[in-house]
Amino acid sequence: MEKFYAVKSGRKAGIFTTWAECEQQVKGFSGARYKSFATKGEAEEFLKGNESSSKTIGKDELHIYVDGSYSKKLKKAGFGCVFVLKEIAVHTVAKEAPIDKDEDLWNVSAEIAGVLCAVEWAIKNKYPIVNIFYDYEGLEKWYSGEWKANKKTTKNYVSKLNQLKKEISINFVKVKAHSGDTFNELADQLAKSAIYNVETENNDRKSVISEILTNAEADKLSLTDFYKIIGEIDEDKVKIKYKDLIINDNAIIKIAKYFWKKEKRKISDLQIEAYFDLSTFILELNLSEKQSDYTLNKKIIIEGE
């Protein structure tokens, strides 16, 4: 199938009909910008500055946050997807992803699997447009042709997306990794959970909380009481902000100290391990005492309005 290679920034800008010609203009050129297209018209639009990556992302459109993870110890990879409509997570997926040991792609293989899963779900549920939020740039650049797909996994990825785009409009949106973006952090957590055989789909918050309350003791903490305990919070140092909940390391430490004091233990002897689940607003505290076998484990459900 004929391709058109548009070079916006290179030794020579323009449209070329072979990869060899395009490569001469961009290889070794600092800041090169180029993409491949199926039609000359699309290539011309790219040179004019009208490429799809600059499209305005509609707030009412489907947003899907995708992330991948790899454990060198377990030699396993997993991906997480968070499906968002109007700032509300309506669906989540956590699944293990296959990896090819000879390709050395590791967590990237998982992210690729996540994107394909996300787009296929969007098509199945009859969405006309999908916006993929990602933090690894190759996911968009292989698809656009800005990066050449050289390996079996990346070639298959590009081939599948080119087939899927016949049924749906696909946009990519870059987000900064581990920047406190609520849905991106949740996708990261889901990807990690998939590695440890915790595969889930459509994980409803109410059902998760119900299961926890059934199988283990848990403390409920309203947002009002939460803020009474932690006091004022410096939003410049916020790790996570979602709706009315603001939480960071200092807030978690204050909550831990609150429950430790209730047991009449000395704060100076407190050691804290904590895990906060963004999908359920559940804070797990594993507290221990220095030079002692005493421990205190708490599951705390932070309840909003």
Image: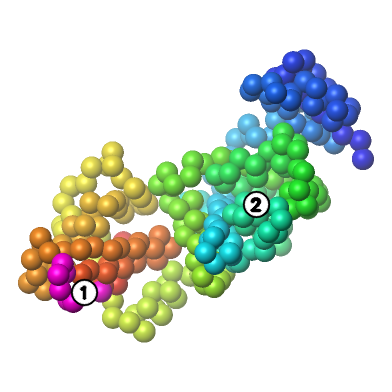
Quick check: is 265 in the magenta stretch? no
Q: Residue furthest bottom?
A: 215
Vertical order, 221 against 187 (above or below): below
Colour convention of the picture? rainbow
Give the side of residue 15 with respect to residue 153, left or right: right
Dividing the image into 4 quarters, which one contains the C terminus? Answer: bottom left
For image coordinates 75% across by 38% down, the residue present is 148
Span of residues in magenta: 289-297
Q: Amino acid at mark 2?
A: Leu
Q: Mark 1 highlights which residue?
A: 296
Percent position of residue 193, x then y: 50, 66
State the SS at label 2. Answer: loop
Residue closest to the eye, 52 or 289 = 289
Give the image quarter of residue 34.
top right
- Mark 2, residue position: 105
| Quadrant of residue 123 within the rendered picture | bottom right
- How packed is label 2: few (under 14 Cα within 10 Å), some, or many (20 or more)? some
Q: Which of the two residues, 36 or 12, is positioned nearer the viewer here?
A: 12
Residue 243 in the image, given as x and y percentages of width and height: 36, 52
Labels 2, 1: front one: 2
> Is 295 part of what is drawn in magenta?
yes
Give neighbour class at mark 1: few <14, some 14-19, many 20+ (Cα, 10 Å): some
In the image, what residue occupies the spot 28% across and 81% down? 217
